[in-house]
Amino acid sequence: MKNKAILFLMAIMLLPLTSMAQDIFAKYSDNPEVTYVSIKPKMFQMLAKMDINSDDPEAQEYLDMVNSITSFKVITTGNKAISGDVTKWVQSHKNALEELMVVKDNGVNMTFYVKQGKDEDHVSEFLMFVDGLSAVTKDMDVNMNGEKREFETVVVSLTGDIDLNQISKLTQKMNIQGAEHLEKKNKK
């Protein structure tokens, strides 16, 4: 009986830690103040089967990268409380990851984290955290579903067998801010 009481007390004491470790994407997937995107493995499989010229080396590299991704999730919000919660989640999650780089520009902080993969060019997880966007986007007229939206925080998670060289090429083609820094990091 004494052992059960001790186990019960330990479970109660650990409860706040388990709720903090909850997957932030699952927590906010249905929240109306969050833009949530989740692309499942089946979608990547469908993309890989698209009729793309396999003789084109660049197209083949793209297909190889798409086939290697098992999960793609994004949360974007302008809500300060949710942004704070996302920041806490990233802080608790980053202990299992390696900081790849930080870009600070005009009040915006962009941090890239990775979990080592099969070799130094591959990662099993890629996490991008952007905070402070409201300083840049506050005067923009962004409307979604007929409502003006402001953005403060973005977190992007990619999992799979990800080739960092391919990610940097893709982000440059998509004209994503900070991609040039990722390319420089890979060349070191």
Image: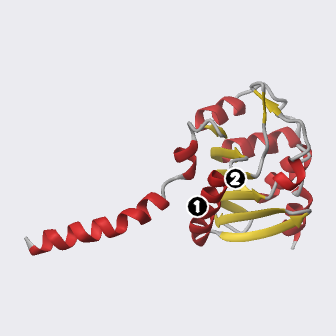
The image quadrant of residue 103 is: bottom right
Q: Quadrant of the C terminus?
A: bottom right
- The answer to the question of whether label 1 and label 2 lie on touching residues, with beta carbons closer than 8 A, is yes
Mark 1 or mark 2: which comes first in sequence? 1
Residue drawn at (29%, 66%) of the image: 11
Residue drawn at (89%, 52%) of the image: 136
Please tell me how many numbered marks the rendered image carries: 2
Residue drawn at (89%, 36%) of the image: 141
Mark 2: which amino acid?
Val
Secondary structure under tag 2 reads strand
Badge 1: residue crowd in 10 Å (few <14, some 14–19, many ≥20): some
Q: Which residue is mark 1?
A: 89
Asked whether residue 56 is in view, the answer is yes
The image quadrant of residue 114 is: bottom right
Q: Position of residue 145 (x, y in %)?
A: 74, 25
Front residue of 74/137: it is 137
The relative height of residue 56 versus residue 187 in the rendered view (above or below) is above
Asked whether residue 160 is in view, the answer is no
Q: Between marks 1 and 2, how big is the CA–CA gap? A: 10 Å
In this rendering, would 167 be left or right of 116?
right
Q: Which mark is residue 155?
A: 2
In this rendering, would 112 be left or right of 45?
right
